[in-house]
Amino acid sequence: MALAFSTTATRADSPAIVFVVDASGSMGQALDGDRKIDTVKSALTDLVAGLPAETPVGLVAFGHRWKGRCDDVEILTPLLDGTSERAPLLRAIDGLEAHGKSPLEAALLTAADHLLELGDSARVILIADGEATCGADPVETVERLQAAGSHFAIDVVAFGATATATSKLHQIAQVSGGRRLEAEGGGSLLATLRQLVTEATSTGEADRGLAAADRRPGIGKLAVSMPFDAKRSLDSLRVSRITDGKLVKSISTPDSVSNHNLLSGSYRLTAFFATPSYGEPTPSDLGSISIEKGRRVEVELGAIAFYVPALNPDPQMIGLETTPPFPIDAVEVRRSGTGACVVRVLDNDNGEYNFLDKPILPGVYDIALQYKGVEGPTTVAEQVVVRPGRTTTVTIDSGIRFRSLEAPILAWRLLRHTESIADATEDGPTPPVGRQLALEVRTTTDIGNRLWLPYLVRPGVFDIEVTLPGREGPLLIAEEVTIAPGQILPFDCGI
C-alpha cells in the first residue's frame, strides 16, 4: 500500500471524524427562534453521545474567541475515542460561542494537519453558515490538499446559509469528494449529521474485520523512497518500536530508494537532517507504520527544493559588494494549518545544508527562517504543495535591507498589510487594523550590527516602524511600502 500520509496503528481500525465548526459572529443570529450556534451545540452533543466507542472524534472551531481576528482557529479537542473519554469533547462543544470572523481556509488546513497521522481513514464534517471572510479561497486550498495526496473527504453542511454562501461552501465538498448537504433547523441539522456519521462509521466495519484477520506474526517489508537529490540533506533514517521506543534499525546516508525487512508490529519512522560542522542531526517525525507478515508498506516522500538567488546576487540588487550575510539561525518547514514545525535544519554558523532539497511527507507547508537574535520564525513562503515522489521548487527572492545610519535606532519593525472582508457581526464596533507583524529586528553589538543586514521576507505591502532611544513606543516612518517579488529592497528611513 502507498503511504501518502502516514498511518497510526492505534487508530487505523476505526475511521476518524473531525468536526469543523463555524463559530463566527453570524452564527449568533437567530434561526427558528434559537441562535444558530446553540442549535449546532445541541445537535453535536446528542450526536457524540451516540457514537461508537471506538470512533476517534476531534473538534476544530473558528471565530469562537475574538472579534475581528483572522487567526482565531483552534483544535479544541484532538482525536479521542470513547474508550478514552468523551467528556473533554462534550465540554468543548458546550463552551462554543459565536464571536468573530470566518478564517475558513485556515480551519480546513488545521484539520488537514491534524489528520496527517490518520491516512485515508479520516473524515471531515464542516458545519458553516457563510463564506470565508479571511485568508485565501478555501476551495483552492482544498484543491492543493488533494494535489498533495490528502484523500480525506470534506462533507459540508450549509446551516442556515444564503443560496450564494451554500453554493460556495458546497464547492469545498465537491473538490474533496465529500457530501453536499443543507440544514435549516435543529431537527434537520441533527438528522443530517447522523446520516453523515452513520455512513462514515459503517464504511470501516468490513475493513476492521479484514485488518484483524490479516495481522499475523512474521516478516514484512518497509520500502522508503524519495526524489534523488533530497537524500543529500539527510543524516539517517531511523525505525523504532512504538511499544517500548527501542531503535530497531538505523539507515545512515539512505539511498533514494531503500527496502528493509522488519518483524510484524508497529513502528515509528524518523528522518534525521544533517547539521554542518559536525552538529547534532535534527529529527523529523514521518509517522507510524504497521508491518504485517508478507506485506510491503511503501512510504513515498516528496521533496522541497529552494531557489534563493540572493545567495549569489547581483551586487546592484542589494547594494552590497559581496554576498550578503543573511543572519539565518535555522530553516524550518511548517504545516500550513497548525504551524507545527516538521523539519528544522540548523545553520550552525555554516549554512551548508540550509537550502538543500528536503525530503518530507506529502502535504501543504510554509517555509520559515529563524533569524539570529529575532524572536520567532519569519515566514518566507506559504502553502507549498508537496506531492508523493515529486520535488516542488520554492523561490525565495524578496526581502529588505536597511541602509546603515548614524542615527541611534534601537529596532525596526515590518508590518504586513493583510486582507479581510469587513463584517459588523464579526469585527465588532471597531474594525481591526489590517496589519500583521512580519519581522522585528533589534540592535546588536556583534560584528556588523544585525539591523543593517539583509532579511528575506515574502513579497507584500508593509508599514515600517522604528524604535528610538528615549521615545516611548514605536515611530511610524513609512506606509504602504511595496516589496516586490525578486527584490531585496534597500530602505533609507530618512532619520
Image (tube, grey):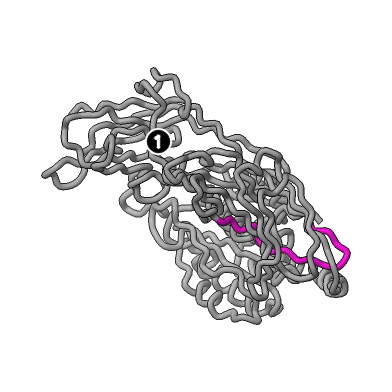
- Residue 116 can be seen in this image: no
Query: Horizontal and vertical percent for residue 419?
Result: 43, 40
Identified at 71% across, 39% down, the residue is 228
The disc labelled 1 sits on which kind of residue?
Phe
Q: Where is residue 398, by image quadrant?
A: top left
Tell me if 493 is positioned left or right of 275 in this view.
left
Find residue 417 and report its horizontal and vertical position in percent: 38, 38
Left or right: 373 as drawn, with respect to 337: left
**494 left or right of 143?**
left
Residue 204 against residue 175 in the figure, above or below: below
Seen in the picture, residue 337 relative to 462 is either above or below; the reply is below
Residue 436, image x and y in percent?
37, 44
Q: Which secondary structure lies at badge 1? A: loop
Specify the segment rendered in magenta. 283-297
Question: On the rendered image, what quadrant is the C terminus found in?
Answer: top left
> Observer-nearest residue: 173 or 479?
479
Disc 1: which residue? 326
Q: From the image, which quarter does the N terminus lie in? A: bottom right
Q: Is residue 215 magenta?
A: no
- Which residue is more in the foreground, 32 or 367? 367
Looking at the image, the residue that sits furthest to the front is: 278
| Quarter of the view holding residue 443 | top left
Magenta residues, dominant SS class: strand
Give percent across and percent down for residue 233: 60, 44
Q: Tell me if mark 1 has few (under 14), some (14-19) or many (20+) residues whose alpha carbon lies within 10 angstroms of its own.
A: some
For image coordinates 45% across by 62% down, the residue present is 64
Q: How many labels does the image show?
A: 1
Residue displayed at 42% across by 35% down: 456
